Amino acid sequence: MPTNEEQIRTLIESWADAVHTGDLGGVLVDHTDDIVMFDVPPPYAGVCGIDAYRETWPGFFEWQRQGASFEIESLHITAGEDIAFAYALLRCGTPQEFADNPENRLRLTLGLCKENGRWVVTHEHHSFPHTDPGAGDEPAEAARG
């Protein structure tokens, strides 16, 4: 039987593949009904519940059909017996965005729990670093310091 880490890696990689191909059913399948997601676009308070989560994806899929990519670059998982978290860096953007800022990566953090012997995502957080264009790679907060 695969380890918890292996099961979670498979879940996350399958989710990312579903996002990349625009497969809404595949995106939703391993999420709880009460999922909480904080995303890059508004609403800044996040979305709560699988129905609200579902509604966030069609616009992203449309953007992706215009040439944007969504690819896991690195993935780290810490898992106990029934609670886990994972964080990843993803290449997420258009060719022009990568030309303008080749090092920019989407940051992903997931909270997971095991329900009925199966890992599911309970929390999802996406963000891009906010940088001050005049400060190089340094976050805007650090540049002010």
Image: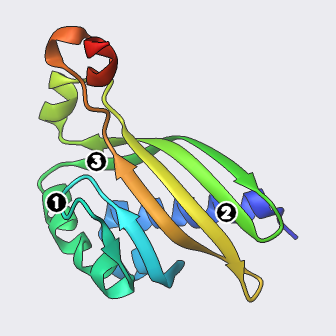
User: Label 2 belongs to which residue?
Assistant: 8
Q: CA distance from mark 1 to mark 3?
A: 9 Å
Residue pointed to by mark 3: 69
Front label number (1 vs 2) = 2
Question: 84 left or right of 40?
Answer: right
Pinpoint residue 72: horizontal percent, then vertical percent. Answer: 47, 45
Q: Which residue is at 16% across, 60% downward?
A: 65
The first of marks 3 and 2 along the sequence is 2
Q: Residue at x 21, y 48 (%)?
A: 68
Q: Give the residue type that dot 2 points to.
A: Ile
Q: Residue furthest front?
A: 145
- Looking at the rendered image, the disc whose residue lies closer to the viewer, 3 or 2, is 2
Residue 35, horizontal then vertical, whole percent: 45, 77
User: In the rendered image of this protein, does residue 15 appear above or below residue 133?
Assistant: below
Quadrant location, the N terminus: bottom right
Residue 29 visible in the displayed image: no
